Image (spheres, rainbow, N blue to C red):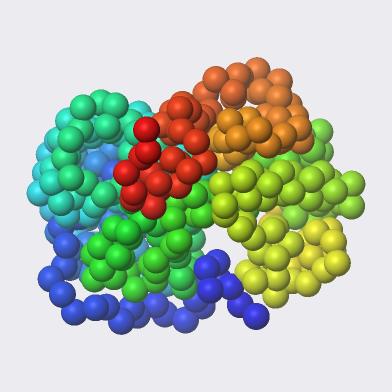
């Protein structure tokens, strides 16, 4: 059984697009994913603007006038504009694709808020946990009154790496990616616009579901933290998911997973367990999470990160674990194991991830009951 969400097509990708006028697109972020998306959209014929806050990353792209793609997609995607000016970047854009690390969502929302216009659709690729809620709350807190839709994808559509400036290799494109909007009744508008270029995007239930089905929150930080000594002594020369996920380590992962599921349940969301996800995604069965991870051939050969100072902690702890713990605390759901991982990560990096992380305050949920949170997400008016 192959995942409808996470499997990568091995054959040459030739999308069957819905026949409609191609949208004008602004891609915000010129990292691996941002360059892949901008180049691919340009290759498909869209008018694309690429924004990055620093000139160093995009200077060569501006000189080249586009991005060369290799791998599953081949060709040069021409870009209409490459800029560090956010106002120019999003002017007249129908789709605003945010492809930056989750730590950058709130700062980018602050920058973009004054220039948003009615009818624009914002999509976070991906939102991690609470990304769309935080982005929505931030633009409103910064004076944006435009009729825009904020939405999030559950994962990045591309498996890709930059080879050098203005050149990206695309290893694969995921088959199906759920997307949800705030409010959820506007999700069809987002999907309709996305499907003009990406048939892979499908309607998700709501942003609570896309956020709390974030399995990376369970696997990435804890595996890195609990293998910190081995990572530092070997510089990552071991199989991360095979050797690093021992029976003892996976018992910790199972406890983290139960806490995530409990927080979701308190919001009326049925979250998929990590063990279920492995079976759906990779056809990896097991009576325990350890057995399922060891049965997953897709994990074989993946080495550990060479250092603990990487996004499995720097992004996934503050933008995935902290929001789950914060929501749990707000709803009276204990998350002692998640709390422990956040504390350990903070000590390892000498950083207060609690202070840096996404919380019910930054997501605009601190004063809301469960009923009101669901009303906000689903689109109903909040009760007094």
| Residue 20 placement: quadrant | bottom left
- Which residue appears at 34% of the width and 73% of the height? 199
Residue 352, horizontal then vertical, whole percent: 60, 19
| Residue 31 placement: quadrant | top left
Side (left or right) of 93 relative to 52: left
Identify which residue, 350 or 371, lies in the foreground: 371
Side (left or right) of 268 relative to 125: right
- Which residue appears at 27% of the width and 78% of the height? 17
Identify which residue, 78 or 143, lies in the foreground: 143
Residue 138, horizontal then vertical, whole percent: 33, 31
Residue situated furthest front in the rendering? 384
Residue 16, horizontal then vertical, whole percent: 30, 81
Q: How many marks?
A: 0
Residue 304 can be seen in this image: no
Residue 14 can be seen in this image: yes
Q: Is residue 56 above or below residue 356?
A: below
- Which residue appears at 81% of the width and 33% of the height? 229
């Amino acid at each position: 059984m192959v995942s409808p969400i996470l499997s990568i097509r091995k054959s040459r990708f030739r999308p069957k697009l819905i026949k409609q006028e191609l949208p004008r697109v602004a891609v915000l972020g010129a990292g691996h994913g941002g360059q892949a998306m901008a180049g691919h959209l340009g290759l498909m014929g869209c008018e694309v603007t690429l924004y990055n806050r620093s000139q160093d990353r995009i200077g060569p792209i501006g000189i080249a006038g586009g991005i060369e793609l290799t791998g599953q997609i081949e060709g040069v995607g021409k870009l209409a504009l490459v800029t560090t000016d956010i106002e120019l970047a999003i002017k007249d854009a129908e789709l605003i694709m945010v492809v930056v690390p989750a730590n950058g969502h709130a700062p980018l929302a602050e920058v973009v808020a004054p220039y948003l216009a009615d009818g624009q659709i914002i999509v976070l690729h991906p939102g991690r946990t609470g990304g769309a809620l935080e982005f929505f709350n931030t633009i409103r807190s910064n004076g944006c009154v435009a009729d825009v839709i904020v939405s999030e994808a559950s994962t990045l559509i591309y498996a890709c790496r930059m080879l050098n400036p203005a050149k990206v290799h695309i290893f694969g494109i995921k088959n199906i990616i759920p997307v949800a909007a705030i409010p959820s009744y506007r999700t069809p508008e987002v999907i309709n616009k996305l499907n003009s270029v990406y048939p892979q995007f499908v309607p998700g239930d709501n942003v609570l579901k896309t956020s709390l089905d974030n399995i990376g929150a369970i696997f990435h930080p804890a595996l890195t933290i609990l293998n910190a000594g081995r990572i530092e002594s070997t510089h990552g020369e071991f199989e991360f998911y095979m050797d690093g996920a021992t029976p003892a380590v996976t018992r910790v992962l199972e406890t983290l997973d139960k806490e995530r599921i409990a927080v979701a349940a308190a919001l009326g969301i049925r979250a998929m367990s990590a063990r279920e996800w492995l079976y759906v995604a990779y056809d990896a069965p097991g009576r325990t999470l350890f057995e399922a991870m060891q049965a997953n051939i897709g994990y074989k050969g993946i080495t550990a990160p060479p250092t603990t100072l990487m996004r499995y902690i720097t992004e996934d702890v503050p933008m995935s674990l902290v929001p789950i713990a914060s929501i749990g605390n707000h709803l009276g759901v204990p998350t002692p194991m998640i709390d422990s991982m956040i504390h350990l990560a903070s000590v390892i990096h000498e950083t207060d991830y609690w202070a840096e992380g996404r919380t019910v305050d930054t997501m605009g949920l601190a004063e809301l009951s469960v009923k009101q949170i669901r009303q906000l997400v689903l689109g109903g008016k909040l009760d007094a």
